[in-house]
Amino acid sequence: MRNEQHRRRPSGKQAQAKKNPSRTYPAKSPEEYADMRERRRRAARIRQMKKKRRRRILLAVLAVAVLAGAGGGGFYLLKETVFRGPVMSYSIKNEFSDYQVTDSEKRADSFAADLCVVSGDKLLDSVSLEDGQEGLLLNLNSREVLYAKGAYERVYPASITKIMTALLAFQYGNMDDVVTITQDNVTLEEGSQVIGFQPGDQVTMDQLVHGLLVYSGNDAASAIATHIGGTEAEFVNMMNDYAAQLGCTGTHFTNPHGLQDENHYTTPYDIYLMLKEALNYPEFTEITQLSSYNVTYKSSDGSDMSVSLTATDHYLTGEATAPKGITVLGGKTGTTSDAGNCLALLCQDAYGEPYISIIMGASTKEILYQQMNSLLENVNAV
C-alpha cells in the first residue's frame, strides 16, 4: 500500500502547480513531443541491449567457473582459445574428451542444427588464394562445406562491417524515420566512400540503408548509428552484443562502417553467421541486388536533393560475370589498404539451391572476382 501511495505522490512540478494555481507552463510543440518519443524509444532499445549484455556476462562467468572446476587444464584451454591466435571451431568433445556431457551436447547441437560446421581447411585444386587470404564456400540447405581456408583466422572486414549495421537498422530502426545529418556523421577519414551528405540534411532511414548497402556510404553508416544508438559508441556496443548473440566468437567492432582500426576485426566464419542472419530480413537481399539507386532527401536549406549511386558489387554492375547457372542474390563488398579486397556473397545455383561464398584479402579487385568465380564454379560441380 505504501508503494502505491508513493507512486501517486505528486511530482515537484505538480506540487508547485498546486501551490501556484495561476502559474502556467508553455505547451510543447509537435516536434518536441516527437523528439521526446524518439528519446524514449532509443532509451528502451539501449536498456534492452544492456540487459542482454548483463545476461551474457553472467553466462560467461558461469562458463569460466565450469572450466575452473575442470582443473587448471580447463583454464589453460580457455586462455589459449580466447586470448591467443586464430579462433578455433568449438566442440564440447574437444574440451571434455573423457567426460559425459550429453545434455550440453544436445544444447550445442540444437544451437548449431542449421549451421555449416567448419572443422578445418578444405581446399580445392581449382581455387588458388594468395598467401594470407581466406575463403569459404558453404551450401546453406545441406550445410555442406565445399571450400574452407582460414575460416577462423582474424581478418579486417572493411565495409563488410555494414552487414551488421544494416541488421541493427532493420531490427531497431523505423524506415520512415527522418534523420538529420550531423557534423560528426560527415567528419570521416579523408578519401573514404561517402554519399556526400552535409550537416542539416534530412534523410529517411530507408534512404540511408539503401546508401549503406548499395554504395557503401560511410556517412550513411554513421547517421544510422547515431540515430539508433544515440551515440556511435553505444551503437558499437549494440553491434558487439548482436555479434555475440549470433555466436561470432572472433568478432569485435569499433565503428559502424569498417574504416581501419586494429581492434576492429572478424573471421570469415563470423561473416557467414552475419550474412546468414541477414537473410531473415527480405529487405536485405532486395536492396543488395540493386545495381544502382537514387537517394532522395532534403538539404539543410529545404531544397530537394537526389544523388545517383552505383553498386560496389561488380557482379551487379556487369563489370564481372558469374559462372553459368549462378545467380548472385546480393552480399557486401569491403576494401581498405589493410583489409585488401573482400567480398561476401549470397547466390543460388540453377536449381535454386542457396550458397554463401566469401573471399578476403585479395590484392586487386580483378583478382578478387577471378577468385570468387573459381569458387562459384564448384557450385555447378556438386
Image (tube, helix red, strand yellow):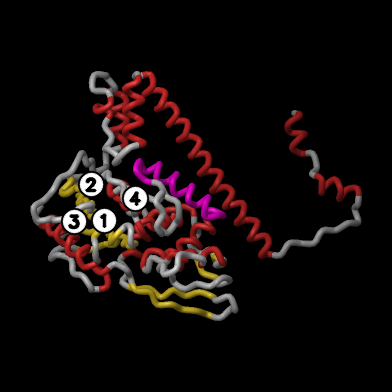
The residue beneath circle 3 is 130
- Using residue 254 as the reference point, say whether residue 316 is left or right of it: left
SS at mark 1? Answer: strand
As measured in the structure, the alpha-carbon distance from the residue carrying label 1 to the one carrying label 3 is 10 Å
As measured in the structure, the alpha-carbon distance from the residue carrying label 2 to the one carrying label 3 is 12 Å
CB of mark 2 within 8 Å of CB of mark 4?
A: no
Q: Position of residue 121 (x, y in %)?
A: 17, 44
Q: Quadrant of residue 112?
A: top left
- Within-10-Å neighbours for mark 4: few <14, some 14–19, many 20+: many
As measured in the structure, the alpha-carbon distance from the residue carrying label 2 to the one carrying label 4 is 17 Å
Q: Position of residue 277 (x, y in %)?
A: 34, 50
| Nearer to us: label 2 or label 4 | 2
As measured in the structure, the alpha-carbon distance from the residue carrying label 1 to the one carrying label 4 is 15 Å
The residue beneath circle 1 is 360
As measured in the structure, the alpha-carbon distance from the residue carrying label 2 to the one carrying label 1 is 10 Å
Q: Amino acid at mark 4?
A: Met
The residue beneath circle 4 is 274
> Disc 2 or 4, which lies upstream in sequence?
2
Q: Amino acid at mark 3?
A: Glu
Q: Position of residue 269 (x, y in %)?
A: 28, 46
Start-end of magenta stretch: 229-251
> Disc 4 or 3, which lies upstream in sequence?
3
SS at mark 3? Answer: loop
* Observer-nearest of 332 and 363: 363
- Within-10-Å neighbours for mark 3: few <14, some 14–19, many 20+: few
The residue beneath circle 2 is 150
- Within-10-Å neighbours for mark 2: few <14, some 14–19, many 20+: many
Q: Which mark is residue 96?
A: none
Residue 191 belongs to magenta span: no
Residue 232 belongs to magenta span: yes
Q: Quadrant of residue 210?
A: bottom left
